[in-house]
Amino acid sequence: MYVFKSRAHSELSDAVASSDVIIVGAGFFGSVIADVASRKFGLTSTIIESRPHIGGNAYSYAEPSTGIEVHKYGSHLFHTSNERVISWVSSFVELNDYVHRVFTTHKNQVFSMPVNLHTMSQFFGSSLNPASARELIESKRARLSGRAQNLYEKGISSIGPELFEAFFGGYTAKQWQQDPRDLPAEVISRLPVRFSFDSRYFSESFQGVPVGGYGEWFERILDNPQISTFLDLDFFDVRRLISDSGKTVVYSGPIDRYFDYSEGRLGWRTVDFEWETLESTNDYQGCSVMNFADRDVAHTRIHEFRHLHPEADYGEGTVIAREYSRQAQNSDEPYYPINTNDDRQMLARYRERAANEDRVVFGGRLGSYQYLDMHMAIASALNTLETEVVPLVKQS
């Protein structure tokens, strides 16, 4: 059975010696590789995780006083149309019937997100249909003489200044701690607008939250005699032991840290959470996630976790978390890559160095410097295992 082992050097040495693959990070990327490596290819793995829990940023647990399953790093909603990912997920867990709908507070009014026919009709005070809404948005769009040079120009040329400023301008400024005029247009590939009354945040048919929570899901994934997991252990404290072993390494930590920041530090945003358990109410805001678009409200959103599990019979009370975004400092947990031109040039140099590393495979959100939704991390892990990890193991 799987056991979270201690940090004893002798136990780690024994686990490494008996493993085919050493995995740094117990999030989706590393955990999927460990699981499929075992079940499909008969390989053994040792996972080294710096945090005191499995699951990476998806980790959830039952809050002691209410029993509500809370997401430690903000609400995580699973959604995919990838049949291969669906097959893997379904072998471990059942998703509940939660459908994610997000709302935004702007000037003391609540609007549906993404922007849809209801949002536009409410905002412009008119009863719009698909044709009239398209015509309205077309009339609002700013005409640029050339390509959008920053996020503000991208926004106003896509949906017009009124909608952009109301729902994206202030919100983005709080998220990135910069004015949208100072952010590259590529920060947002597109601004979602639906010319229908569909208020679902995700459109995939396979979506929900795992019954029992993400923490329980990860326990099932790693409950395997061929996987040894060491928590609260920094890979860099035992790097020499791992290197001397000659084993194949899957590294899903920060790629710049692996190379001792030799090409510079990549830029990240991080988030802080202000937690509150409310005993006087069972419903604080009526939904799981409420965005706050206005610049004079410090937090970007509030999570209320009991709404994520409509199948659960929770008792009294509710748990909320206010989320604040800021630039990550050296000691912070990185969440979202900033991905400026300087970052991309730096990343290219790191990837060149990574390609020359012997028996080391880089991946995951931190190892690839990409924002990966959960389903994307799973799909990447499945592909990486077959195309990179297994061939390296077979060479040994």
Image: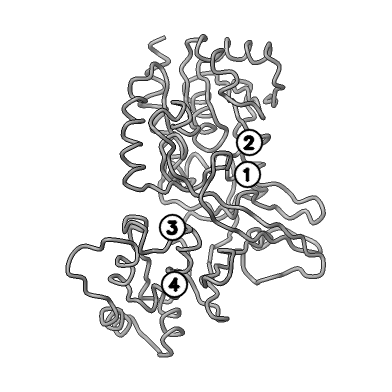
Q: Which mark is residue 128?
A: none
Mark 2 or 3 closer to N-term?
2
Are dots 1 and 4 in contact, CB under 8 Å? Answer: no
Task: Check disc 2: other Cα within 10 Å, few if <14, some if 14-19, many if 20+.
Answer: many
Mark 2 or 4 closer to N-term?
2
Q: Which mark is residue 54?
A: 2
Label 4 to label 3: alpha-carbon separation: 13 Å
* Viewer-proximal residue among 360 and 269: 269
Mark 1 or 4 closer to N-term?
1
Mark 4 or 3 closer to N-term?
4
Q: Looking at the rendering, in which quadrant would you find the N terminus?
A: top right
How many numbered callouts? 4
Rendering coords of residue 313 (x, y %) = 75, 60
Q: Which mark is residue 198?
A: 4
Relative horizontal placement of residue 281, taking residue 223 as reference (left or right): right
Image-quadrant location for residue 302: bottom right
Relative horizontal placement of residue 34, taking residue 362 as reference (left or right): right
Residue at (52%, 10%) from the top-left corner? 245
Are dots 2 and 1 in contact, CB under 8 Å? Answer: yes
Tell me the SS state at disc 1. Answer: loop
Task: Check disc 1: other Cα within 10 Å, few if <14, some if 14-19, many if 20+.
Answer: many
Tell me the SS state at disc 3. Answer: loop
Tell me the SS state at disc 2. Answer: loop
Task: Check disc 3: other Cα within 10 Å, few if <14, some if 14-19, many if 20+.
Answer: few
Are dots 2 and 4 in contact, CB under 8 Å? Answer: no
**Residue under label 1:** 59
Label 2 to label 3: alpha-carbon separation: 27 Å
Label 2 to label 1: alpha-carbon separation: 7 Å
Q: Which mark is residue 204?
A: 3
As drawn, 299 above or below 140: above
